[in-house]
């Protein structure tokens, strides 16, 4: 009998293999990019929690030769670095003050090692998302865009409210490539408000 379970995972897994991406998660970013017009050629992009490197490959392709992608992770990349990519091996919690207001787009797919205890995992993930948000607040150009992975659970509503104070467009979105039973979703955030007020894209 044919197995129906995990069909969607298998589809994205095989597609990533065929298209030489080290992780299937690239199709989440691709869908976000197509729907919300995230990246344009020449953009300067920060990829928080970038290993093994699928998002970096996609971002570097989209940003093109005039753009640049800087990735940060505690783990190593599994892709070769191209000319418009830079990798910083570091814990994102130690990044404070590393960047100026340099980036057009900041994406965060950062995720902690899971314990299997939902409340613990949601808490750890939220802590990393808070760190990513605070990096975005300091390192995005006015009008910049931010994408951040989150897990449904306690504390997420508060996080959304915080994001709304900093950005004028905040939208939760669940890409098709997210696994069926996962509580994962992405926050799509645009129009970083600078000190002079919000700037529309
Ligand atoms: C789901 S993976 C990212 C996949 C990536 N977007 C891709 O397409 O290849 C999450 C990453 O977050 C990283 N991570 C977790 N905690 C971190 C931390 N404190 N600082 C930096 N990276 C961290 C992990 O090492 C892991 O590589």
Image (spheres, grey):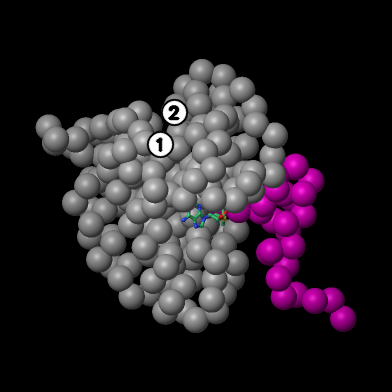
Where residue 159 sits, quadrant-wise, is bottom left
Q: Looking at this view, is 153 or 200 the one in front?
A: 153
Q: Nearer the viewer, residue 195 or 90?
A: 90
Distance (Cα) linking label 2 and label 1: 7 Å
On screen, residue 156 versus residue 46, left or right, reads left
Q: Is residue 59 shown to the viewer in this render?
A: no
Residue 6 within the magenta-colored segment of the rendering: yes
> On the image, which quarter does residue 20 sit in?
top right
Q: Is residue 114 above or below residue 187?
A: below
In this picture, residue 156 sits left or right of residue 75:
left
Disc 2 crowd, CA 10 A, few/some/many (<14, 14-19, 20+): many
Q: Position of residue 88 (x, y in %)?
A: 52, 38
> Which span of residues is magenta-colored?
1-28
Residue matched to label 2: 44
Asked whether mark 2 lies closer than 8 Å to ligand 1, one says: no
- Say if 67 sits above or below 78 in the image: above
Q: Residues within 10 Å of mark 1 (few under 14, many from 20)?
A: many
Q: Which residue is mark 1?
A: 105
| Residue 4 % position (x, y) | 75, 75
Q: Residue at 42% across / 68% down in the picture?
A: 124
At x 55%, y 36%, the residue is 87
Q: Residue at x 50, y 63 (%)?
A: 112
Residue at screen point 70% across, 34% down: 80
Residue 103 included in the magenta stretch of the image: no
């Amino acid at each position: 009998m044919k197995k129906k379970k995990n069909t969607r995972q298998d589809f994205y897994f095989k597609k990533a293999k065929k298209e030489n991406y080290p992780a299937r998660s690239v199709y989440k970013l691709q869908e976000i990019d197509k729907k919300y017009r995230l990246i344009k050629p020449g953009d300067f992009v920060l990829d928080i929690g970038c290993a093994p490197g699928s998002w970096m490959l996609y971002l570097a392709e989209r940003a093109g030769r005039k753009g640049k992608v800087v990735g940060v992770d505690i783990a190593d990349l599994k892709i070769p670095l191209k000319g418009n990519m830079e990798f910083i091996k570091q814990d994102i919690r130690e990044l404070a003050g590393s960047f100026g207001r340099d980036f057009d787009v900041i994406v965060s797919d950062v995720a902690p090692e899971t314990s299997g205890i939902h409340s613990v995992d949601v808490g750890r993930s939220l802590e990393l998302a808070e760190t990513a948000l605070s990096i975005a607040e300091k390192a995005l150009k006015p009008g910049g865009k931010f994408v951040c992975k989150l897990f449904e659970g306690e504390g997420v509503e508060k996080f959304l409210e915080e994001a709304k104070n900093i950005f004028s467009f905040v939208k939760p979105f669940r890409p098709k490539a997210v696994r069926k039973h996962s509580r994962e979703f992405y926050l799509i955030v645009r129009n970083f408000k600078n000190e002079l007020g919000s700037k529309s894209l």
